[in-house]
């Protein structure tokens, strides 16, 4: 089963006791997958163990994906091989996309959002750590909806504009972003009480001046306007680093994304 590393909270015994058709899946991409074995601030396996044992989320199998795909390719692979392989190995997995979540950070966080947005028939929940829902490089995402102007704007509204323009999706989205996850001049950052290094990478400020904080707030507001469930944790002084997107909010996020499911242990 070449889908990545699979983790069963409580081992085979706990899985055997789970209710058939109510077993959930979480897919962890990129840095989340690299840190799956409780490295750094993530503690993904420990969080699954605790929440499942406390009956706060469905019995949930964690899958640490072993590839780095675009949203469209991810959706194709989930449908063609990943989900069939997992279902063959674990027959109690639910067929309901409400029992599936995908998570990623930075660009992988934006890709996770795109995967949920375009693949609601297979996965309807997502978690993003400092997701790059910004318009650097005119990164718009959100395919499969009417076309809007993809050009970058000072408000970084490629995502929020398309969310407002497109029909609402049946999704749940939770994200973390730092108050210092901004990109601008040194004076801009110091005025915001942040240091000189955004930690955001090589974004050309003359092209887009991508600002993760503003963009994620805009997305949250757009989802609120459309009546789509969303959750946004703003981390004081957090930058574009694991201290912002690590385990600081994962337990709360997992509880919330599965809040609309029905299950029994």
Image (cartoon, rainbow, N blue to C red):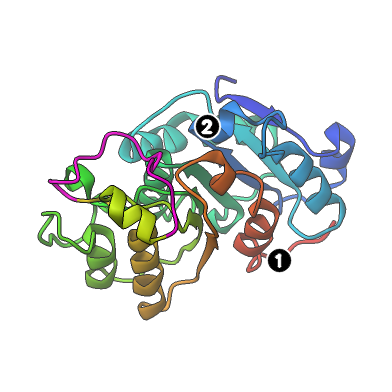
Q: Nearer the viewer, residue 109 or 97?
A: 109
Quarter of the picture holding the N terminus: top right
Q: Is residue 247 above or below residue 56?
A: above
Please tell me whether the stretch drawn in magenta is mainly helix, strand or loop. Answer: loop
Residue, disc 2: 31
Question: Can see residue 208?
Answer: yes
- Around disc 1, counting alpha carbons within 10 Å, would you say few (fewer than 14), some (14 to 19), or many (20 or more)? few
Using the image as rendered, state which of residue 85 and residue 53 is in the foreground: 53
The residue at 19%/46% (across/down) is 205
Disc 1 + disc 2, Cβ < 8 Å: no
Residue 199 is a magenta residue: yes
* Circle 2 Cα neighbour tier, 10 Å, few/some/many (<14 / 14–19 / ≥20): some
Magenta-drawn stretch contains 95: no
- Magenta part of the protein: which range? 193-208
Locate the C terminus and report the quarter of the image it occupies. bottom right
SS type, badge 1 = loop
* Residue under label 1: 262
- Compared across the picture, whether 170 is left or right of 87 comes to left
> Residue drawn at (74%, 57%), measured in percent from left and top?
57
Image position, residue 68 (x, y; %): 41, 27
Q: State which quadrant residue 9 falls in.
A: top right
Cα distance, mark 1 to mark 2? 30 Å
Residue 164: horizontal and vertical position, in percent?
Answer: 26, 72
Q: Secondary structure at mark 2?
A: helix
Describe residue 96's horizontal placement relative to residue 221 as left or right.
right
Position in image of residue 191 (x %, y %): 36, 61
N-term-proximal mark, 1 vs 2: 2
């Amino acid at each position: 089963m070449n889908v990545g590393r699979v983790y069963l909270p409580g081992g085979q015994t706990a899985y055997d006791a789970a209710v058939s058709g109510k077993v959930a899946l979480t897919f962890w991409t990129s840095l989340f997958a690299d840190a799956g074995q409780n490295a750094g601030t993530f503690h993904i396996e420990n969080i699954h163990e605790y929440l499942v044992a406390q009956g706060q989320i469905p019995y949930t199998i964690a899958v640490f994906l072993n590839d780095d795909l675009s949203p469209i390719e991810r959706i194709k692979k989930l449908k063609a091989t990943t989900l069939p392989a997992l279902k063959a190995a674990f027959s109690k997995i639910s067929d309901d996309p409400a029992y599936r979540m995908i998570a990623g950070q930075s660009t992988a966080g934006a890709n996770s959002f795109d995967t949920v947005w375009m693949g609601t028939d297979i996965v309807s929940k997502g978690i993003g750590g400092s997701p790059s829902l910004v318009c650097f490089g005119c990164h718009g995402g959100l395919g499969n909806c009417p076309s809007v102007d993809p050009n970058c704007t000072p408000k970084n509204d490629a995502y929020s504009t398309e969310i407002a323009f497109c029909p609402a999706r049946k999704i749940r989205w939770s994200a973390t972003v730092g108050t210092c996850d901004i990109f601008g001049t040194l004076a801009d950052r110091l005025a915001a009480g942040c240091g000189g290094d955004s930690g955001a990478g090589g974004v050309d400020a003359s092209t887009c001046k991508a600002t993760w904080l503003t963009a994620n707030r805009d997305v949250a507001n757009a989802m609120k306007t459309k009546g789509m469930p969303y959750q946004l944790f703003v981390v004081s002084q957090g930058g574009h680093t694991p201290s912002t997107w690590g385990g600081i909010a994962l337990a709360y996020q997992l509880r919330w994304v599965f809040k609309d499911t029905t299950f029994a242990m």
